[in-house]
Image (spheres, coloured by chain):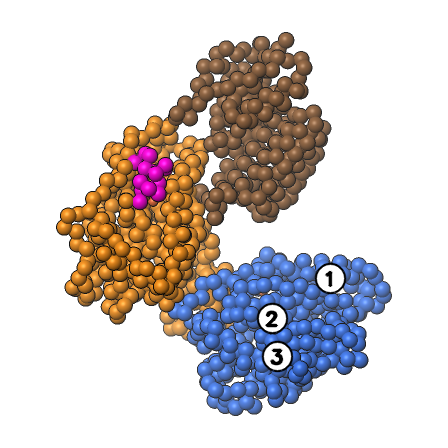
């Protein structure tokens, strides 16, 4: 069957801007880990869908604000993460846990703001949701309920896993030269594993998949294009669980140092539409969070977090355990990234439209939903 | 008070081109120093409002050409200004007589050795002018060094604050020129330098101004001159907009004229430049951070009374950008 | 004749063995490989045959697992009473008052400036230059040709790879790996890894 994905969806700046506004500024997105903002005044900053955001701990309360000072637009916090009160470095305006201006040095003497004016100064706040030790953010002024976007069983399993995350986390970012959508088409496709990862992943894990006999191939247009209808349609795009079979986990000493999550020897995967993937290839001992950040039509940052399950007690070499695991996942991920960069570089506006098989029915459903959003004025 | 500066003024290519046409091709732009082309036949090429303009010394007369076309040029002491308009406004429409003579007086006192470099900054050119007219940031951003030896009180120009809150009613060319004249000022600031570090070469030049003060000149839209050592040496900063998010910051360091010959003056200037690099570096880093978080729906700035001078400029700027009025 | 048992694994074991063989005519230099199992654990039984009265041990394991593997064998040898004398190549230029700890290796043509301190179990390979008053803490790994300025502090278990230049006065955090061939001119946080296969440094937060 012919796909709905015209090459322009991967190439056009206009489409990219539309995605940012119609998808990324509307849905719940991964925003970071609570362990990075565990203490009073700890913060993380990010740019999400073009909007700079600071996530800050105010005496235990975690809040998300637009990271732009109301005085003259300086970022209130800088750097990926740190620990510092929410005070602007330019002229030292400070803000409280509600985002209101707390203090302006010499306000009377040099600014002369009326009480009303001062009170009206408030940072734009964004909705946050905590799932285990993961944080999700929604940039919309009227955010949809978290449960509208994700199925309860999906959230429950992800939360259970995320509760077991250790507080030591290894982070890096790769700059991928491909469109963000290619990653997810690839992640929903187990068929590529035995070819692309023949020597690596396929050698240790087995991902059975089948083409559902009565696959809904999304041949007809979406019926319910109301806002709730389109939200409902996107819910099945996020799913997770024990998807692959693995050989018995090789007993390396660090496994005994952590409290394993669960007991099932399986390859766990979670896909949270639109841009989060969590993988656990060793049945609950460690987790890789891949967060894909669209930068431009042909550019996607891949932010990688590597975490083990909670340590029973701290030990000096734990960061080396994270590092060797990171190096290992890198070898597999590089195989994917190289392939997707090749796909992107061969794309042009007259390139042939893909042809999909029955096993790719989930992708087809997403594409039907995606093109509805891109081509019409309907919203989620 | 809410500012008039919408984020698009710092982000949009269209606005950028409008600025080039309506400001940079209309006003007098700093175009270099006589000392850079001291002899007959010397030339230099300057990028002005997006055009390469050749400045040449013809038997001591300075000329400016874009292609074959001669452009208006005016020397003010050591400083050269060029106007690219087909029908350029008289320079005294742009610089008040007192500002003009202050520039002339100080630059006439300069020596002929010039230290020069360029930084490529990632911010909109307007941010640096807003920053230069803002003494309040010094104690916070430069808390570590600058703030210690200069004692700054922040002036609050009350009448201007009132005025800046009103719309600009008269948008004739004459009124706009009168407005821009007020943006250019300079000379002695109220800032004293009580503990100027005496270095030996200070005794070997003739300082300008005669007081232990901070001297400072702003010539809208592309020049800032400062002397942080009571007129013994001067730094000129020339800002060249490259795109909405890029500005070239060109630095010239120059000494007051020598009263006796010494051969280490370039090293003395270099030490000055390295010394100020940290402070200017702090400003640049902050402005790049501001530019980096700006987006089309970012909140509008909120200014206090002390920022009235900036508010006046913004009023004039917004009139130029949003209406058909011209200088 | 006393024995010099060079104990470890990999290419670095070979290198250290040859260095010791060339350097000491008065010792019986022997190379002893310690096997690593599938779980990467060492088989320590070899130590049962070695006695401090009959000779001394030099531990030669490379930077694997952030130098923790070399540290592991070093501890075992220490517990068993070996002196673990350091190896300083006769062709190295080491300031006379520099302090060199146990089981340190300093390769040929290495230059160690005055008042440097190189703590136990660290390795400074051939041609590396360490500026005056620098301090290398324990179990550091410095690859051939690395240039380190003066007054530099390098945390335990750090790895500095060929091509790296560390500017004077810089502090390199413990467990850091400077693998990008470039000038490092700002302090490096603990456990920051610059690996050439990656686009950005790898950072560790929390504990
Ligand atoms: S810009 Fe934040 S206090 Fe001035
Ligand atoms: Fe893959
Ligand atoms: Fe400043």
Residue A189: give x, y in percent of width and height. Answer: 28, 47
The magenta span reads: A192-205
Q: Are marks 2 and 3 in contact (CB under 8 Å)?
A: no
Residue B189: where, in percent of width, then height? 65, 73
The numbered mark, 3 or 1, whose residue comes first in the sequence reads 3
**Mark 2–mark 3 distance (CA, rounded to whole Å):** 15 Å
Q: Looking at the image, is mark 3 or mark 1 nearer the viewer?
A: 1
| Residue B19 horizontal side relative to residue B63, left or right | left
Q: Secondary structure at mark 3?
A: loop
Tell me: residue B305, above or below residue C167: below
Residue under the image location 70 percent in, 77 percent down: B55
- Is A194 within the magenta? yes
Confirm whether the magenta stretch covers residue A117. Answer: no
State if disc 1 and disc 3 touch (CB < 8 Å): no
Q: Is residue A95 above or below residue B22?
A: above
Q: CA distance from mark 3 to mark 1?
A: 26 Å
Q: Which label number is shown at residue B269?
A: 1
Name the N-terminal-most of marks 1 and 2: 2
Q: Chain of mark 3?
A: B
Whether residue A285 is visible to the viewer of this picture, yes or no, is no
Instruction: Kindly indicate which chain is depicted in blue in the rendered structure.
Output: B
Q: The numbered mark 2 sits on a residue in which chain?
A: B
Q: Residue at x 45, y 66 (%)?
A: B294
**Numbered badge on residue B184:** 3
Q: Which chain is orange?
A: A
Residue at 26%, 61% in the rendered image: A4
């Amino acid at each position: 069957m012919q796909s709905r994905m015209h090459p322009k969806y991967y190439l056009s700046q206009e489409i990219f801007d539309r995605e940012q506004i119609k998808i990324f500024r509307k849905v719940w997105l991964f925003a970071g880990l609570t362990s990075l903002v565990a203490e009073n005044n700890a913060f993380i900053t990010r740019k999400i869908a073009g909007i700079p955001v600071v996530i800050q701990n105010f005496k235990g309360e975690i809040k998300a604000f637009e990271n732009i000072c109301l005085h003259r637009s300086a970022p209130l916090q800088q750097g990926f993460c740190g620990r510092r009160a929410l005070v602007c470095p330019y002229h030292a305006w400070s803000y409280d846990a509600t985002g209101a201006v707390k203090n302006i040095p010499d306000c009377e003497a040099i600014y002369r703001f009326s009480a009303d004016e001062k009170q009206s100064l408030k940072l734009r706040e964004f909705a946050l949701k905590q799932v285990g030790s993961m944080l999700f953010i929604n940039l919309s002024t009227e955010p949809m309920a978290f449960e509208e976007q994700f199925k309860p069983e999906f959230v429950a399993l992800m939360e259970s896993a995320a509760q077991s995350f250790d507080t030591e986390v290894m982070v890096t970012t790769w700059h991928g030269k491909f469109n963000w959508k290619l990653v997810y088409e690839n992640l929903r496709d187990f068929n590529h594993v035995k070819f692309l990862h023949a020597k690596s992943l396929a050698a240790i894990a087995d991902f059975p998949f089948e083409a559902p006999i009565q696959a809904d191939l999304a041949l007809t247009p979406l019926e319910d294009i109301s806002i709730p209808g389109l939200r409902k349609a996107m819910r099945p795009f996020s799913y997770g669980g024990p998807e692959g079979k693995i050989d018995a986990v090789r007993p390396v000493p660090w496994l005994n140092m952590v409290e394993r999550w669960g007991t099932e020897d399986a390859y766990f995967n979670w896909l949270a539409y639109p841009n989060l993937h969590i993988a656990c290839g060793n049945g609950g001992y460690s987790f890789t969070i891949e967060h894909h950040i669209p930068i431009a039509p042909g550019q996607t940052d891949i932010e990688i977090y590597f975490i083990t399950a909670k340590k029973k007690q701290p030990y000096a070499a734990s960061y080396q355990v994270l590092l060797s695991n990171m190096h290992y996942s890198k070898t597999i991920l590089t195989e994917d990234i190289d392939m997707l960069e090749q796909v992107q570089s061969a794309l042009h506006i007259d390139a042939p439209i893909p042809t999909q098989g029955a096993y790719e029915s989930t992708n087809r459903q997403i594409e039907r939903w995606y093109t509805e959003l891109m081509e019409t004025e309907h919203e989620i | 008070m809410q500012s008039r500066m919408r984020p698009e003024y710092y982000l949009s290519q269209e606005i950028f081109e409008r600025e080039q046409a309506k400001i940079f091709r209309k006003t007098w732009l700093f175009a270099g120093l006589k000392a850079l082309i001291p002899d007959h036949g010397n030339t230099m090429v300057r990028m002005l409002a997006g055009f390469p303009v050749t400045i040449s010394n013809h038997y001591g007369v300075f000329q400016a050409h874009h292609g074959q076309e001669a452009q208006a040029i005016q020397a003010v002491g050591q400083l050269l200004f060029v106007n690219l308009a087909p029908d350029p406004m008289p320079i005294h429409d742009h610089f008040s007589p007192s500002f003009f003579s202050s520039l002339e007086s100080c630059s006439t006192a300069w020596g002929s050795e010039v230290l020069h470099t360029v930084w490529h900054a990632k911010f909109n050119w307007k941010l640096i002018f807003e920053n230069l007219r803002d003494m309040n940031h010094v104690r916070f951003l430069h808390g570590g060094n600058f703030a210690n030896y200069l004692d700054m009180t922040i002036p609050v120009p009350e009448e201007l604050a009132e005025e800046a809150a009103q719309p600009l009613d008269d948008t004739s060319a004459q009124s706009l020129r009168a407005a821009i004249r007020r943006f250019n000022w300079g000379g002695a600031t109220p800032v004293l330098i009580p503990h100027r570090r005496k270095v030996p070469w200070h005794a070997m030049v003739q300082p300008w101004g005669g007081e232990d003060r901070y001297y400072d000149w702003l010539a809208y839209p592309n020049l800032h001159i400062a002397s942080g050592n009571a007129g013994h040496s001067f730094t000129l900063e020339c800002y060249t907009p490259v795109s909405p998010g890029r500005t070239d910051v060109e630095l010239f360091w120059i000494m007051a004229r020598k009263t006796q010959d010494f051969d280490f003056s370039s090293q003395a200037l270099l030490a000055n430049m390295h010394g100020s690099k940290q402070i200017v570096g702090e400003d640049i880093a902050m402005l790049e951070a501001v530019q980096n978080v700006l987006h089309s729906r970012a909140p509008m700035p909120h200014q206090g009374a002390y920022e009235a001078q900036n508010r006046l400029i913004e009023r004039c700027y917004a009139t130029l950008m949003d209406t058909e009025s011209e200088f | 004749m006393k024995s010099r048992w060079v104990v470890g694994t990999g290419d670095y074991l070979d290198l250290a063995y040859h260095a010791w063989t060339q350097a000491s005519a008065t010792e019986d230099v022997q190379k002893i490989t310690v096997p690593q199992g599938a779980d990467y654990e060492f088989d320590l039984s070899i130590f049962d045959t070695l006695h401090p009265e009959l000779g001394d041990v030099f531990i030669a394991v490379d930077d694997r697992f952030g130098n923790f593997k070399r540290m592991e064998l070093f501890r075992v040898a220490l517990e068993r009473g070996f002196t673990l004398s350091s190896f300083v190549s006769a062709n190295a230029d080491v300031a006379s008052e520099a302090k060199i700890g146990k089981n340190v290796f300093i390769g040929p043509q290495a230059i160690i400036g005055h008042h440097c301190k190189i703590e136990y179990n660290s390795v400074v390979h051939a041609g590396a230059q360490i500026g005056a008053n620098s301090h290398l803490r324990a179990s550091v790994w410095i690859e051939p040709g690395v240039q380190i300025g003066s007054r530099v502090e390098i945390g335990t278990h750090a790895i500095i790879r060929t091509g790296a230049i560390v500017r004077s006065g810089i502090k390199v955090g413990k467990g850091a790996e400077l693998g990008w061939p470039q000038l490092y001119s700002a302090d490096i946080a603990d456990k920051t890894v610059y690996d050439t296969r990656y686009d950005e440094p790898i950072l560790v937060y929390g504990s």
